Structures are given as C-alpha cells and as structure tokens.
C-alpha cells in the first residue's frame, strides 16, 4: 500500500476538495445525513500468493504487485452516529498484476464497478 498525503480545501460548509493521494475527491455534504463524492482511486498493493493458474502461466508461491486506477461517484447515508450505508459506482480504467520475479504480468480490460456496503464504528 502506498502512503498518502495532500491538501484539503474547505470551499464552504457543504463543499470540500480533497487533493489527497491516493484517493482525491470532490465532496458535497448537503446535510448531516448525506455525503456525495466524485472520486478517483489509485490502489497499489503487494503480497505473496499460493498457486496461480491462468491460460498463459502457472505460478506457485509468487510475489505479486497489484495496481488499479478507477474513478466514480459515491453516496453515504448516516443511519445513526455509528452506522453508514455506502453506495457507489464507477469505472476501472486499469487493473494490473505484476509477477516481477517470474517475469509475468496480467492486465484486465477497463470495466464498470458497483460498491454497496455498511460502515460500522465501534
């Protein structure tokens, strides 16, 4: 995972621009219950896998670096002080798996995505 940083500009009480890497967003909060985001996401991670079998290659115990670039919209609704419903949709521009020690890689074609969930704080 990449470390992040950036600047948040509080435009007014309802609008803010989060120029924060790796998740920049334009945020609108019309009231205390709703939050809407126009966002971008740069996702990077690395991990070790067990067995991977594709039509092109077979790998065992491989180290992989994963990256994804996407943009979209998201809405959050506060059900209570501790629980929020999250709905989002967007488009994944690029998704890549790099098995650099095995000199292999895989790239997925651009595709839409949908996100539904609950956030709970304890």
Image (tube, rainbow, N blue to C red):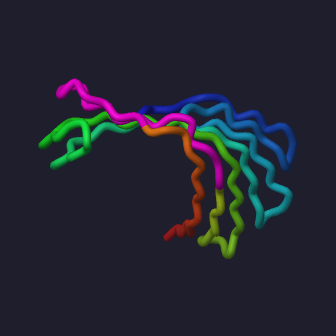
Q: Is residue 117 above or below residue 16?
A: below
Does the image show residue 43?
no
**Residue at left 85%, top 48%?**
13
47 or 13, which is in the foreground?
47
All told, the count of numbered labels is 0
**Residue at left 76%, top 33%?**
9
Residue at far front of view? 55
Q: Is residue 102 above or below residue 95?
A: above
Compared across the picture, whether 20 is left or right of 73 comes to: left
Compared across the picture, whether 47 is left or right of 61 comes to: right
x then y, percent, for residue 37 = 72, 49
x then y, percent, for residue 69 = 53, 35
Q: Which residues are magenta?
A: 89-107
Does the image show residue 31?
yes
**Residue at left 63%, top 68%?**
84
Image quadrant holding the N terminus, namely top left
- Locate residue 80: give its quadrant: bottom right
Residue at far left of view? 60
Compared across the picture, whether 119 is left or right of 89 comes to: left
94 or 18, which is in the foreground?
94
Report if residue 95 lies within the magenta region.
Answer: yes
Report if residue 40 lies within the magenta region.
Answer: no
x then y, percent, for residue 81 = 65, 71
Q: Which secondary structure dominates the residues rendered in magenta?
A: strand
106 or 49, which is in the foreground?
106
x then y, percent, for residue 29 = 80, 54
């Amino acid at each position: 995972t990449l470390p992040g940083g950036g600047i948040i500009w509080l435009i007014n009480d309802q609008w803010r621009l989060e120029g924060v890497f790796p998740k920049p967003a334009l945020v609108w909060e019309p009231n205390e219950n709703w939050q809407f985001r126009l966002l971008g996401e740069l996702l990077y991670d690395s991990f070790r896998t067990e067995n991977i079998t594709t039509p092109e290659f077979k790998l065992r115990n491989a180290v992989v670096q994963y990256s994804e670039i996407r943009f979209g919209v998201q809405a959050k609704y506060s059900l209570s002080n501790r629980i929020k419903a999250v709905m989002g949709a967007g488009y994944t521009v690029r998704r890549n798996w790099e098995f650099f020690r095995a000199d292999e890689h895989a790239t997925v074609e651009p595709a839409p995505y949908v996100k539904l969930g609950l956030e709970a704080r304890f």
